[in-house]
């Protein structure tokens, strides 16, 4: 139990310090913030800085996964397709709720600092057994965007992670500064609207022409 508690304290300290100072924050500072006198505690529990970053992500995903699956089940139970907004709500609302329900107020900024890291890559999100909800949501978003050219659809979905991390980190900072409330549902809805708009934005004539110029035309 003592080892588990120490490990969790290190994870929480790493989340906060990386959010505030970046992913290169000294490991000794994280160990000290977690109350560890031995600077090798991080190596003992996580093996490396990358191992620690992965542990923070997996620690929070345990909560996010349960809530995302709940929201997806609620949508499925309603008998109506979730649509673009419903899928984005299932993806993003649990991240907002980390602050409102659980008092976790640094995770979005932590994600912004570590992006792009293999722990939050497309491959990790689509291949991990513990991220079923993300896989379902991303496949659903892909189906919602079938009017877009395939290459553009891929680019927009890849950019979604960057947009989410940046927008949620800004919301987290604003909540910390007292400029908004962490539980402001109107702010949540506005961010989800922005994400939906970015994904489904009409393709301009210039973009279409550039796309065709890059795609070799078949002969005959």
Image: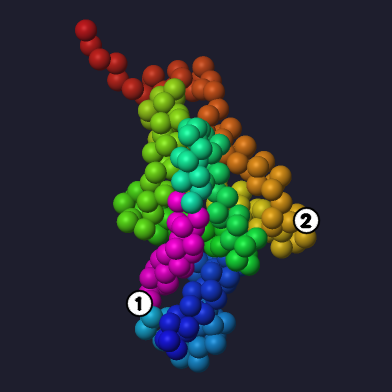
Residue depicted at x 48% and y 78%: 8
Q: Residue at x 42, y 49 (%)?
A: 133
The crowding category of the residue bearing disc 1, from other C-alpha atoms within 10 Å (few below 14, some 14 to 19, many at least 20), is few
Query: Is 146 one of the magenta-colored residues?
Result: no
Comparing 85 with 75, the one in front is 75
Horizontal side, residue 94 vs residue 215: left or right: right
Query: Which is more toward the observer, 136 or 40?
Result: 136
Numbered disc 2: secondary structure: loop
The label shown at residue 20 is none
Q: Is residue 48 magenta?
A: yes
Viewer-closest of 64 and 53: 64
Question: Where, by quadrant of the figure, is residue 129 drawn?
Answer: bottom left
What colouring method underlies this structural image? Answer: rainbow
Give the crowd class for mark 2: few <14, some 14-19, many >=20 residues within 10 Å: few
Say which residue label 2 marks.
179
The mark that comes first in sequence, 1 or 2, is: 1
Q: Quadrant of the C terminus?
A: top left
Q: Secondary structure at mark 1?
A: loop
């Amino acid at each position: 139990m003592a080892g588990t508690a120490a490990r969790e304290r290190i994870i929480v300290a790493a989340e906060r310090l990386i959010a505030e100072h970046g992913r290169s924050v000294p490991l000794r500072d994280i160990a000290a913030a977690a109350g560890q006198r031995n600077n090798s505690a991080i190596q003992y529990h996580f093996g490396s800085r990358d191992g620690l970053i992965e542990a923070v992500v997996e620690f929070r995903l345990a909560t996010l996964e349960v809530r995302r699956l709940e929201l997806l089940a609620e949508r499925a139970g309603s008998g109506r397709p979730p649509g673009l907004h419903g899928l984005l709500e299932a993806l993003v609302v649990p991240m907002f709720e980390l602050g409102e329900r659980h008092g976790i107020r640094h995770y979005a900024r932590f994600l912004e600092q570590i992006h792009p890291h293999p722990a939050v890559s497309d491959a990790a999100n689509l291949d991990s057994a513990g991220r079923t909800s993300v896989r379902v949501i991303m496949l659903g978003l892909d189906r919602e965007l079938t009017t877009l050219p395939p290459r553009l659809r891929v680019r927009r979905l890849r950019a979604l992670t960057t947009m989410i991390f940046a927008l949620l980190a800004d919301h987290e900072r604003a909540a910390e500064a007292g400029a908004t409330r962490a539980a402001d549902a109107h702010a949540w809805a506005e961010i989800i609207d922005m994400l939906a708009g970015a994904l489904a934005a009409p393709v301009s004539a210039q973009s279409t022409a550039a796309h065709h110029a890059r795609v070799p035309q078949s002969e005959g």
